[in-house]
Protein backbone atom coordinates (compact mmCIF):
# COMPACT_ATOMS: atom_id res chain seq x y z
CA UNK A 1 0.00 0.00 0.00
CA UNK A 2 2.83 2.38 0.89
CA UNK A 3 4.55 1.71 -2.46
CA UNK A 4 1.31 2.38 -4.35
CA UNK A 5 0.76 5.67 -2.51
CA UNK A 6 4.36 6.67 -3.13
CA UNK A 7 3.98 5.85 -6.83
CA UNK A 8 0.78 7.93 -7.08
CA UNK A 9 2.47 10.82 -5.28
CA UNK A 10 5.43 10.72 -7.67
CA UNK A 11 3.14 10.63 -10.73
CA UNK A 12 1.02 13.56 -9.47
CA UNK A 13 4.14 15.58 -8.60
CA UNK A 14 5.65 14.89 -12.02
CA UNK A 15 2.42 15.80 -13.83
CA UNK A 16 2.06 19.00 -11.81
CA UNK A 17 5.67 19.96 -12.49
CA UNK A 18 5.26 19.26 -16.20
CA UNK A 19 2.08 21.36 -16.33
CA UNK A 20 3.80 24.19 -14.45
CA UNK A 21 6.74 24.07 -16.86
CA UNK A 22 4.39 24.14 -19.83
CA UNK A 23 2.32 26.93 -18.24
CA UNK A 24 5.41 29.17 -18.29
CA UNK A 25 5.06 29.20 -22.08
CA UNK A 26 1.29 29.77 -22.06
CA UNK A 27 0.36 33.28 -23.24
CA UNK A 28 -3.20 34.48 -22.62
CA UNK A 29 -4.32 37.25 -25.00
CA UNK A 30 -7.76 38.84 -24.57
CA UNK A 31 -9.70 41.87 -25.75
CA UNK A 32 -10.69 43.74 -28.89
CA UNK A 33 -13.01 41.90 -31.26
CA UNK A 34 -11.62 44.08 -34.04
CA UNK A 35 -8.18 42.61 -33.39
CA UNK A 36 -9.14 39.01 -32.60
CA UNK A 37 -8.59 37.68 -36.15
CA UNK A 38 -5.24 39.47 -36.31
CA UNK A 39 -4.27 38.11 -32.89
CA UNK A 40 -5.20 34.58 -33.88
CA UNK A 41 -3.23 34.87 -37.13
CA UNK A 42 -0.17 36.04 -35.17
CA UNK A 43 -0.64 33.22 -32.65
CA UNK A 44 -0.90 30.51 -35.32
CA UNK A 45 2.29 31.56 -37.08
CA UNK A 46 4.15 32.22 -33.81
CA UNK A 47 3.32 28.73 -32.50
CA UNK A 48 4.54 27.20 -35.76
CA UNK A 49 7.89 28.87 -35.15
CA UNK A 50 7.84 28.22 -31.38
CA UNK A 51 6.20 24.80 -30.84
CA UNK A 52 6.86 24.80 -27.07
CA UNK A 53 4.71 27.94 -26.71
CA UNK A 54 0.92 28.10 -26.64
CA UNK A 55 -0.92 31.37 -27.35
CA UNK A 56 -4.64 31.52 -26.51
CA UNK A 57 -6.47 34.45 -28.14
CA UNK A 58 -10.05 35.41 -27.23
CA UNK A 59 -12.21 38.48 -27.89
CA UNK A 60 -14.93 40.13 -25.82
CA UNK A 61 -14.06 43.76 -26.44
CA UNK A 62 -11.28 46.18 -25.52
CA UNK A 63 -12.78 46.85 -22.10
CA UNK A 64 -12.87 43.13 -21.36
CA UNK A 65 -9.22 42.73 -22.33
CA UNK A 66 -8.07 45.64 -20.20
CA UNK A 67 -10.16 44.42 -17.24
CA UNK A 68 -8.50 41.00 -17.60
CA UNK A 69 -5.04 42.60 -17.62
CA UNK A 70 -5.91 44.60 -14.50
CA UNK A 71 -7.24 41.51 -12.72
CA UNK A 72 -4.20 39.48 -13.74
CA UNK A 73 -6.13 36.93 -15.81
CA UNK A 74 -4.35 37.62 -19.11
CA UNK A 75 -0.80 38.40 -20.20
CA UNK A 76 -1.68 40.70 -23.10
CA UNK A 77 -4.76 42.89 -23.63
CA UNK A 78 -5.75 43.80 -27.19
CA UNK A 79 -7.39 47.22 -27.44
CA UNK A 80 -8.69 49.37 -30.28
CA UNK A 81 -8.65 52.42 -28.00
CA UNK A 82 -6.26 54.02 -25.51
CA UNK A 83 -6.55 52.88 -21.93
CA UNK A 84 -8.64 55.29 -19.83
CA UNK A 85 -7.33 57.22 -16.84
CA UNK A 86 -9.75 55.43 -14.50
CA UNK A 87 -8.46 52.08 -15.79
CA UNK A 88 -4.86 53.16 -15.17
CA UNK A 89 -5.80 54.25 -11.64
CA UNK A 90 -7.51 50.94 -10.92
CA UNK A 91 -4.58 49.02 -12.36
CA UNK A 92 -2.09 50.83 -10.12
CA UNK A 93 -4.24 50.08 -7.08
CA UNK A 94 -3.84 46.38 -7.95
CA UNK A 95 -0.10 46.66 -8.59
CA UNK A 96 -0.46 46.53 -12.39
CA UNK A 97 1.53 48.92 -14.58
CA UNK A 98 -0.13 49.06 -18.05
CA UNK A 99 2.41 49.33 -20.85
CA UNK A 100 1.07 50.44 -24.27
CA UNK A 101 2.44 49.07 -27.57
CA UNK A 102 1.07 50.27 -30.91
CA UNK A 103 1.01 47.32 -33.31
CA UNK A 104 -1.20 48.33 -36.26
CA UNK A 105 -3.57 50.93 -37.71
CA UNK A 106 -7.19 50.41 -38.68
CA UNK A 107 -9.84 52.23 -40.68
CA UNK A 108 -13.43 52.03 -39.44
CA UNK A 109 -15.71 51.19 -42.35
CA UNK A 110 -19.31 52.44 -42.31
CA UNK A 111 -21.37 49.89 -44.21
CA UNK A 112 -24.85 49.51 -45.69
CA UNK A 113 -26.63 46.78 -47.60
CA UNK A 114 -25.48 46.53 -51.27
CA UNK A 115 -29.07 47.33 -52.36
CA UNK A 116 -28.99 50.70 -50.61
CA UNK A 117 -28.49 53.46 -53.24
CA UNK A 118 -26.63 55.72 -50.77
CA UNK A 119 -22.89 55.43 -51.36
CA UNK A 120 -21.30 58.41 -49.62
CA UNK A 121 -21.83 60.49 -46.46
CA UNK A 122 -20.10 63.22 -44.50
CA UNK A 123 -19.10 62.96 -40.85
CA UNK A 124 -21.95 65.36 -39.99
CA UNK A 125 -24.45 63.12 -41.77
CA UNK A 126 -23.12 60.07 -39.94
CA UNK A 127 -23.46 61.86 -36.62
CA UNK A 128 -27.05 62.81 -37.51
CA UNK A 129 -27.89 59.20 -38.39
CA UNK A 130 -26.36 57.53 -35.36
CA UNK A 131 -27.80 60.05 -32.88
CA UNK A 132 -31.24 59.67 -34.46
CA UNK A 133 -31.62 63.21 -35.84
CA UNK A 134 -31.97 61.75 -39.33
CA UNK A 135 -34.27 58.73 -39.26
CA UNK A 136 -35.23 57.99 -42.89
CA UNK A 137 -33.00 57.10 -45.83
CA UNK A 138 -35.00 59.44 -48.13
CA UNK A 139 -33.44 62.41 -46.27
CA UNK A 140 -30.08 61.26 -47.64
CA UNK A 141 -31.13 60.44 -51.19
CA UNK A 142 -32.13 56.86 -50.44
CA UNK A 143 -35.41 54.97 -50.31
CA UNK A 144 -38.36 55.88 -48.10
CA UNK A 145 -37.28 53.51 -45.33
CA UNK A 146 -36.63 53.96 -41.62
CA UNK A 147 -32.91 53.73 -40.90
CA UNK A 148 -31.91 50.74 -38.76
CA UNK A 149 -28.90 51.81 -36.65
CA UNK A 150 -26.37 49.14 -35.67
CA UNK A 151 -23.59 49.74 -33.16
CA UNK A 152 -21.08 47.72 -31.19
CA UNK A 153 -21.90 47.38 -27.50
CA UNK A 154 -20.55 49.88 -24.97
CA UNK A 155 -17.67 47.64 -23.82
CA UNK A 156 -16.20 47.76 -27.30
CA UNK A 157 -13.27 50.04 -28.14
CA UNK A 158 -14.81 50.42 -31.59
CA UNK A 159 -18.00 51.79 -29.98
CA UNK A 160 -15.98 54.26 -27.89
CA UNK A 161 -13.90 55.43 -30.84
CA UNK A 162 -16.91 55.93 -33.11
CA UNK A 163 -18.77 57.89 -30.43
CA UNK A 164 -15.82 60.15 -29.63
CA UNK A 165 -14.61 60.76 -33.19
CA UNK A 166 -17.86 60.72 -35.20
CA UNK A 167 -20.78 61.52 -32.90
CA UNK A 168 -18.82 63.97 -30.72
CA UNK A 169 -16.31 65.06 -33.40
CA UNK A 170 -13.44 65.01 -30.88
CA UNK A 171 -15.07 67.79 -28.84
CA UNK A 172 -14.38 67.02 -25.14
CA UNK A 173 -17.50 68.86 -23.92
CA UNK A 174 -19.88 67.11 -26.32
CA UNK A 175 -22.51 64.86 -24.75
CA UNK A 176 -23.81 63.25 -27.96
CA UNK A 177 -24.93 59.65 -27.56
CA UNK A 178 -26.19 56.90 -29.83
CA UNK A 179 -29.91 57.02 -30.54
CA UNK A 180 -32.02 54.97 -28.07
CA UNK A 181 -33.22 52.96 -31.07
CA UNK A 182 -29.68 51.82 -31.97
CA UNK A 183 -29.21 48.05 -31.76
CA UNK A 184 -26.09 47.26 -29.72
CA UNK A 185 -24.51 44.08 -31.12
CA UNK A 186 -21.88 41.93 -29.47
CA UNK A 187 -19.41 41.64 -32.34
CA UNK A 188 -18.30 43.10 -35.66
CA UNK A 189 -19.39 39.88 -37.36
CA UNK A 190 -22.90 40.32 -35.96
CA UNK A 191 -23.05 43.78 -37.53
CA UNK A 192 -21.75 42.41 -40.84
CA UNK A 193 -24.40 39.67 -40.85
CA UNK A 194 -27.25 42.05 -40.00
CA UNK A 195 -26.26 44.58 -42.68
CA UNK A 196 -26.01 41.76 -45.24
CA UNK A 197 -29.62 40.75 -44.56
CA UNK A 198 -31.26 44.14 -43.88
CA UNK A 199 -31.59 46.70 -46.73
CA UNK A 200 -32.31 49.52 -44.24
CA UNK A 201 -29.40 48.88 -41.87
CA UNK A 202 -26.22 50.88 -41.34
CA UNK A 203 -23.34 49.89 -39.10
CA UNK A 204 -19.60 50.20 -38.61
CA UNK A 205 -16.64 47.91 -37.97
CA UNK A 206 -12.92 47.53 -38.65
CA UNK A 207 -12.30 47.43 -42.39
CA UNK A 208 -10.87 43.91 -42.08
CA UNK A 209 -14.49 42.69 -41.85
CA UNK A 210 -15.58 44.16 -45.21
CA UNK A 211 -17.00 41.60 -47.63
CA UNK A 212 -19.09 41.60 -50.79
CA UNK A 213 -22.19 41.19 -48.62
CA UNK A 214 -21.86 44.78 -47.37
CA UNK A 215 -21.20 48.08 -49.16
CA UNK A 216 -18.60 50.35 -47.52
CA UNK A 217 -19.49 54.03 -47.82
CA UNK A 218 -17.12 56.74 -49.00
CA UNK A 219 -16.71 59.25 -46.17
CA UNK A 220 -15.79 62.96 -46.20
CA UNK A 221 -14.76 65.18 -43.29
CA UNK A 222 -17.26 67.79 -44.51
CA UNK A 223 -19.11 68.86 -47.67
CA UNK A 224 -16.00 70.66 -48.99
CA UNK A 225 -13.75 67.62 -48.67
CA UNK A 226 -13.24 64.65 -50.96
CA UNK A 227 -15.15 61.45 -50.23
CA UNK A 228 -12.69 58.66 -49.47
CA UNK A 229 -13.04 54.88 -49.35
CA UNK A 230 -11.85 52.83 -46.33
CA UNK A 231 -8.72 51.37 -47.91
CA UNK A 232 -5.25 50.62 -46.59
CA UNK A 233 -3.77 53.27 -48.87
CA UNK A 234 -6.19 55.94 -47.64
CA UNK A 235 -5.47 55.09 -44.00
CA UNK A 236 -1.71 55.30 -44.60
CA UNK A 237 -1.91 58.67 -46.38
CA UNK A 238 -4.38 60.07 -43.85
CA UNK A 239 -7.15 60.75 -46.37
CA UNK A 240 -9.73 58.45 -44.80
CA UNK A 241 -11.20 60.38 -41.85
CA UNK A 242 -12.16 57.47 -39.55
CA UNK A 243 -8.93 55.67 -38.70
CA UNK A 244 -7.21 54.73 -35.44
CA UNK A 245 -4.24 52.90 -33.90
CA UNK A 246 -4.51 49.40 -32.44
CA UNK A 247 -2.67 48.46 -29.24
CA UNK A 248 -1.39 45.62 -27.13
CA UNK A 249 -1.09 46.24 -23.37
CA UNK A 250 1.13 44.35 -20.94
CA UNK A 251 1.86 44.62 -17.24
CA UNK A 252 5.10 46.61 -17.36
CA UNK A 253 7.71 45.99 -20.03
CA UNK A 254 7.13 42.56 -21.57
CA UNK A 255 9.51 39.76 -20.69
CA UNK A 256 10.14 36.15 -21.68
CA UNK A 257 7.58 34.47 -23.94
CA UNK A 258 5.30 37.53 -23.88
CA UNK A 259 8.15 39.73 -25.17
CA UNK A 260 9.00 37.17 -27.84
CA UNK A 261 5.39 37.12 -29.05
CA UNK A 262 5.15 40.93 -29.22
CA UNK A 263 8.54 41.14 -30.94
CA UNK A 264 7.15 38.73 -33.53
CA UNK A 265 4.01 40.87 -34.00
CA UNK A 266 6.21 43.91 -34.69
CA UNK A 267 8.66 42.02 -36.93
CA UNK A 268 8.47 42.13 -40.72
CA UNK A 269 6.72 38.75 -40.72
CA UNK A 270 4.23 39.89 -38.09
CA UNK A 271 3.54 43.16 -39.90
CA UNK A 272 3.03 41.24 -43.16
CA UNK A 273 0.24 39.41 -41.31
CA UNK A 274 -1.20 42.82 -40.35
CA UNK A 275 -1.40 43.65 -44.05
CA UNK A 276 -2.88 40.27 -45.04
CA UNK A 277 -5.65 40.68 -42.44
CA UNK A 278 -6.59 44.08 -43.95
CA UNK A 279 -5.02 46.31 -41.32
CA UNK A 280 -2.21 48.82 -41.79
CA UNK A 281 1.33 48.02 -40.58
CA UNK A 282 3.14 50.36 -38.20
CA UNK A 283 6.52 48.88 -39.19
CA UNK A 284 7.40 48.44 -42.85
Image (cartoon, grey):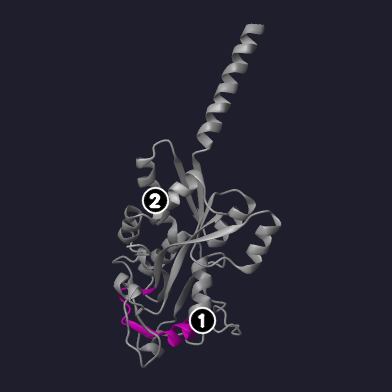
Nearer the N terminus, badge 1 or badge 2?
1
Where's residue 131, x and y in %?
52, 82
Crowding near the residue tagged with mark 1, few <14, some 14–19, many ≥20 C-alpha atoms within 10 Å = many
Give the residue displayed 49% in from the left and 55% down from the top.
Answer: 59
Residues rendered magenta in the picture: 109-131
| Mark number, residue 188 | none
In this view, which residue lies farthest toward the bottom?
224
Q: How many marks?
A: 2
| Mark number, residue 167 | 1
Cα distance between the residues tagged 1 and 2: 36 Å
Q: Label 2: which residue?
A: 264
Residue 113, image quadrant? bottom left
The one of 4 and 260 positioned closer to us in this rendering: 260
Crowding near the residue tagged with mark 2, few <14, some 14–19, many ≥20 C-alpha atoms within 10 Å = some
Residue 204, image quadrant? bottom left
Task: Describe the element under mark 2 as helix, strand or loop.
Answer: helix
Where's residue 134, x and y in %?
47, 87
The one of 82 and 138 positioned closer to us in this rendering: 82
- Magenta residue check for 107: no
Q: Which of the image's four quarters has the C terminus?
A: bottom left
Give the residue displayed 47% in from the left and 59% down from the top.
Answer: 33
Task: Describe the element under mark 1 as helix, strand or loop.
Answer: helix
- Asked if residue 132 lies left or right of residue 97, the reply is left
Residue 46 in view here: yes
Give the residue displayed 59% in from the left and 58% down from the top.
Answer: 98
- Asked if residue 27 lies left or right of residue 277, the reply is right
Amino acid sequence: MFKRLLFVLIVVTFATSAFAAKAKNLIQVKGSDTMVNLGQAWAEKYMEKNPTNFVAVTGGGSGTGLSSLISGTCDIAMSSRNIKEKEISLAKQKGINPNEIKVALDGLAVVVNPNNPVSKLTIDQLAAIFTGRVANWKELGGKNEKIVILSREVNSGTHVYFKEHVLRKNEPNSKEEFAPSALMLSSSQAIADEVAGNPAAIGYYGMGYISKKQKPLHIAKDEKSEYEAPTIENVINGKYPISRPLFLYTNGMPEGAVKNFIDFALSKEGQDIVLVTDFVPVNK
